[in-house]
Image (cartoon, rainbow, N blue to C red):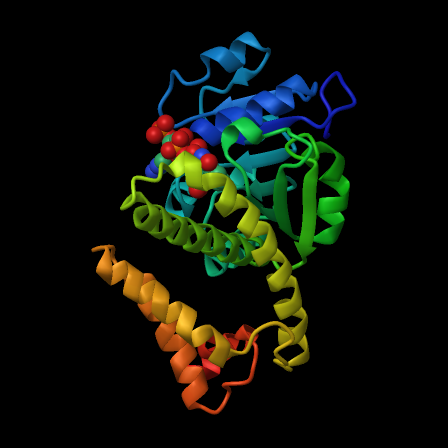
């Protein structure tokens, strides 16, 4: 059932945005019989030239492959596409690579099961040009058996193919958590550039210092992760009390230069709160307690 004139799994990709086109192109390049469908026609021209078949309807697309991949804007779009063709899902594996929240993934997994389909969910931690690269990370959740069955096929999309959990919602949770690190880092980077920019330091001039510093920050994160898992926040590097003056300097420098101080002011408030709660001699890892649900 899984193969059509080749030993490679027949794959259907629904959604031909930037990401869907990259996914379909990677499967086709790896020799998988690949069928595509997109709500708006006309986006498959390059893929067709590389041997991909364009289905006329969503129902035709679903029926074409045993592994059905959907990658569209959001879960509402996934359901809009799949609800009318649910009768064709039975016996197939639905792999949803559309970004969303964990509760949406779990609900879609349940819905697919009701219609006789296996379900895998994936979070793509890369932009379309990186699809197929050895270091591209894609995080999967859902049935471990289904993942094992399709792992070789999925490795076509990225060398960092990883199954996290039988729970289909976990990849979405990791996805938003990792994106949070990305946006938090971006914002701090922008704030720093605005600061040094007041002295006409070009972003590219500051960049090597920022990227090298991130290596140091990553090593602190490793220490803090171990402390957080143990629930012991022994300050092996710097206490919260020690970090209070420097964060104050960052707030001061920002105000003095007319740069938005929201980010350092928030950080300063977190440190002050922990110190006020009696944790002055703890490491920065203590701040996790502020974010935990029980603290809110
Ligand atoms: N691009 C990235 O860097 C990246 C990285 C990781 C994850 N992702 C995720 O991958 C998914 C697709 O991203 P993308 O970059 O391919 O987005 P995109 O280029 O904006 O494409 C959106 C796709 O969704 C389809 N779509 C939107 N609303 C629809 C609806 N109501 N019914 C049917 N189809 C609908 C569009 O079809 P039409 O052509 O008909 O409008 C198009 O195929 C998103 O969930 C995104 O978060 C993207």
The image quarter containing residue 158 is: top right
Q: Position of residue 61 (x, y in %)?
A: 52, 27
The residue drawn where x is 51% and y is 54% is 105
Query: In front here: 214 or 127?
Result: 214
The residue drawn where x is 32% and y is 51% is 195
Viewer can see residue 277: yes
From the viewer's perspective, is residue 18 above or below residue 137?
above
* Direction left: furthest residue: 258
The image quarter containing residue 221 is: bottom right
Q: Position of residue 127 (x, y in %)?
A: 50, 34
* Direction right: furthest residue: 7
Q: Position of residue 43 (x, y in %)?
A: 41, 18
Quadrant holding the C terminus: bottom left
* Direction front: furthest residue: 199
Relative side of 70 to 232, left or right: left
Q: Position of residue 264 (x, y in %)?
A: 35, 65
The residue drawn where x is 58% and y is 30% is 131
Q: Within the displayed image, which quadrant is ligand 1 positioned in?
A: top left
Quadrant holding the N terminus: top right
Relative side of 7 to 283, left or right: right
* Direction top: furthest residue: 49
Q: Disc count in the image?
A: 0
Query: In front here: 149 or 201?
Result: 201
Query: In front here: 294 or 64?
Result: 294
Relative side of 248 to 96, left or right: left
Viewer can see residue 82: no
The residue drawn where x is 54% and y is 38% is 126
């Amino acid at each position: 059932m899984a193969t059509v004139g080749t030993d490679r799994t027949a794959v259907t990709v629904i959604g031909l945005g930037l990401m869907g086109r990259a996914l379909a192109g990677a499967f086709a390049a790896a020799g998988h019989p690949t069928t595509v469908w997109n709500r708006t026609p006309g986006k498959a021209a390059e893929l067709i030239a590389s041997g991909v078949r364009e289905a006329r309807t969503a129902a035709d697309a679903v029926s074409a492959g045993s592994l059905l991949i959907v990658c569209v804007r959001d879960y509402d779009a996934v359901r809009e596409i799949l609800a009318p063709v649910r009768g064709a899902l039975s016996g197939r594996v639905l792999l949803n690579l559309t970004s969303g929240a964990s509760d949406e993934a779990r609900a879609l997994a349940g819905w697919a099961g009701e219609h006789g389909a296996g379900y895998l969910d994936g979070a793509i931690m890369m932009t379309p040009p990186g699809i197929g690269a050895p270091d591209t990370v894609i995080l999967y959740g859902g049935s471990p058996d289904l993942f094992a069955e399709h792992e070789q096929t999925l490795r076509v999309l990225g060398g960092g193919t990883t199954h996290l959990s039988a729970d289909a919602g976990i990849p979405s949770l990791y996805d938003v958590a990792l994106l949070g690190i990305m946006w938090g880092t971006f914002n701090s980077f922008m704030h720093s550039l605005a600061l040094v920019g007041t002295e006409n330091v070009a972003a590219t001039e500051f960049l090597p210092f920022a990227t090298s510093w991130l290596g140091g920050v990553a090593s602190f994160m490793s220490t803090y992760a171990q402390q957080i898992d143990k629930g012991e926040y022994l300050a092996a590097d710097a206490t919260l009390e020690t970090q209070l003056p420097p964060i104050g300097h960052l707030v001061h420098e920002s105000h003095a230069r007319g740069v938005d101080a929201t980010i350092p002011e928030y950080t300063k408030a977190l440190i002050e709160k922990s110190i006020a709660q009696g944790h002055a001699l703890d490491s920065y890892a203590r701040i996790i307690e502020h974010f935990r649900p029980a603290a809110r």
